[in-house]
Amino acid sequence: MIINNNIYTSPLVNKDYKGNRIDKFLSACFPDLSRSQIQKLILSGNVSCDDVVILDNSFKVKENDAYQIFVPPAVEAEPKPENIPLNIIYEDNDLIVVDKPAGMVVHPAPGAYNATLVNALLYHCQDLSGIGGVKRPGIVHRIDKDTSGLLVVAKNDLAHRFLSEQFFEHSIERTYFALVYNVPNPLKGKIVGNIARSSFDRKKMAIVQTGGKYAVTNYETIETFHNAAALVKCNLETGRTHQIRVHMSSIGCNLIGDQVYVKKQKTTLKGFDNQVKSLINSFPRQALHATTLGFVHPTTKKFMQFSSDFPDDFYSLWQNLKK
């Protein structure tokens, strides 16, 4: 296969693939493109063979033919200011610290172009840093849509660079609390494991033996519940995508409510009554909250630390686990 100037050219169809659907054939040729992406490209007239455009996903490929996919370059849509209330913990001329609610996406992305933290910040701030691109003005780091808690955002380029350096050097203080299935063994420890995109499921990250990004999570069990669940404090030395979710899963302690890493067959939750079991297994998001955030201020050079109380849904689940 050849990739040149956003044009993907498949190898010649051999007898093993003869008669396959074109969307299936092309997704096998180009694993970096999902089948749904390929189907959309076909329907939008971006797939051809010998200059003949193919518009049918069920088209059967022919032996010795090669197919071309044109992938239009991504165009960043400029996010618009939106009057969305923010829980602002701290703000000055250089930065703003926000307590993000669960359910809010940090920056615009496919499927979530509006009602993001960036849209809210553009309304609130007139001078967000331009570093980070059109979609990510001022964003130094992010937390998942369904994770709640603290974020710092830069309001000028100097602050953006200074804060970014601290994240790069892993000198930022970040503490999360998680409610997990089972109890960690040992109760306190360090999880070290490189993280990369899962080769089996594109929605997941995974610990990999080779490659990936170095990741370290220090954890401590704060409270246990009937030896079937626990409240765990996690301090990040690094900040990788889904790091806590992947690392806790690796020791058999998936986050309660995690829709990606928890299998449909939940733990038996021995010791809890049926009402509490139902609350646990129906919790609508990963039970993860970014509780503390500490960093050196870009102008004053003083260390600043902020904290956030558990949000109502997390607190309620925690109290029910105590019962």
Image (spheres, grey):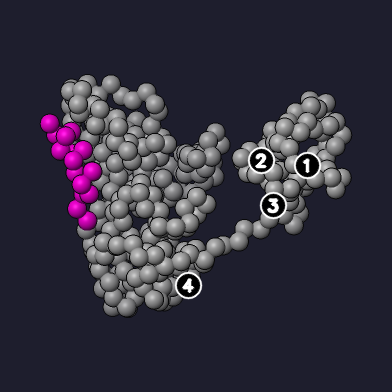
Quarter of the image with the N terminus in it: top right
Q: Secondary structure at mark 2?
A: helix
Callout 1 crowding tier (Cα within 10 Å): few <14, some 14–19, many ≥20 = many
Decide which of tag 4 and tag 2 comes sooner along the chain: 2
Task: State the residue at coordinates (80%, 32%).
Answer: 61
Horizontally, residue 5 falls left or right of residue 125, namely right
Q: Which residue is mark 1?
A: 54
Task: State the residue at coordinates (83%, 40%).
Answer: 66
Q: Quadrant of residue 279?
A: top left
Q: Which residue is mark 2?
A: 39
Query: Hey, what amino acid is under mark 3?
Result: Val
Q: Which residue is mark 4?
A: 130
Of the two numbered discs 2 and 3 in the rendering, the one whose residue sits closer to the viewer? 2
* C-beta proximity under 8 Å, tags 1 and 2: no
Image height of 306 relative to 21, above or below: below
How far apart marks 3 and 1 lie (CA) works out to: 14 Å
Q: Which residue is mark 3?
A: 71
How far apart marks 4 and 2 lie (CA) works out to: 35 Å
Callout 4 crowding tier (Cα within 10 Å): few <14, some 14–19, many ≥20 = some
Query: Hey, what amino acid is under mark 2?
Result: Gln
Relative image position of residue 9 (x, y in whole percent): 78, 45
Of the two numbered discs 4 and 3 in the rendering, the one whose residue sits closer to the viewer? 3
Q: In front: 19, or 269? A: 19
Q: Secondary structure at mark 1?
A: loop
Decide which of tag 1 and tag 2 comes sooner along the chain: 2
Query: Hey, what amino acid is under mark 1?
Result: Ile
In the rendered structure, which segment of residues is drawn in magenta? 308-323
Query: Hey, what amino acid is under mark 4?
Result: Gly
